Amino acid sequence: PGQTVLDAAAKRRGLAARLHWIKEWVPTTGLTDDEFAAIKRTLTDGAPVCGGFRWPKNAQWDDGLLRMAPAAEVFDGHSVLLSGYVDDGDVPGGGSFSIRNSAAAGANGRMSYEYVREYMNDAAWIEPAP
């Protein structure tokens, strides 16, 4: 990296930000009810949640919502940032999370509760320095 980036990193090195795991990496299980509730609680409190997922080999989107894929058609993985949620009985699993997806052309989308419960490998949030 250039000197500007190195200088900016040096200034931030001493910040007291803390990483909080909601679910440590396990690529063979989805979320427990407690982990799912902790993600929603963290978002309600205003912190985004970093999530690693088993991802569709051929991701398909329906009006911005990532389509559920069978287990044989996902791989480990891809990470996105969950930034909010909406409970909605018309969406598989009862609602969806708003996501920031660096791999998508529009970079934003939604992921159903069903998808998150089934395919989330890990979840964490960062507590900023006071």
Image: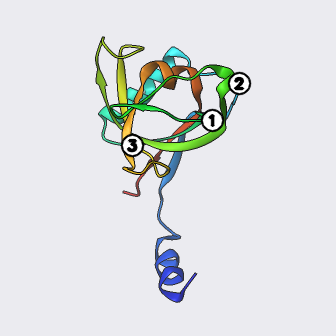
Identify the mark nearer the N-term, 1 or 2: 2
Pointer 2: what residue?
Answer: 28
Pointer 3: what residue?
Answer: 48
What label does residue 92 carry, if any?
A: none
State the residue at coordinates (53%, 35%): 59
Q: Quadrant of residue 49?
A: top left
Question: Residue at the bottom extreme?
Answer: 3
Disc nearest the viewer among 2 and 3: 2
Q: Quadrant of residue 129?
A: bottom left
Circle 1 sits in a helix, a strand or a loop, which is it? loop
Circle 3 sits in a helix, a strand or a loop, which is it? loop
Contact? badges 1 and 2 (CB < 8 Å): no
Circle 2 sits in a helix, a strand or a loop, which is it? loop
Crowd tier of the residue under label 2, counting other residues whose Cα lies within 10 Å: few below 14, some 14–19, many 20 or above: few
Quarter of the figure with the C terminus: bottom left
Residue 61 at x, y percent in the picture: 42, 33
Q: Nearer the viewer, residue 31 or 104?
A: 104
State the residue at coordinates (39%, 43%): 48
Q: Amino acid at mark 1?
A: Lys
State the residue at coordinates (65%, 27%): 73
Distance from label 2 to label 3 (Cα)? 24 Å
Residue 68 at x, y percent in the picture: 51, 22
Pointer 1: what residue?
Answer: 57
Residue 129 vertical placement versus 36 (above, below): below
Crowd tier of the residue under label 1, counting other residues whose Cα lies within 10 Å: few below 14, some 14–19, many 20 or above: few
Disc nearest the viewer among 1 and 2: 1
| Residue 63 visible in rendering | yes
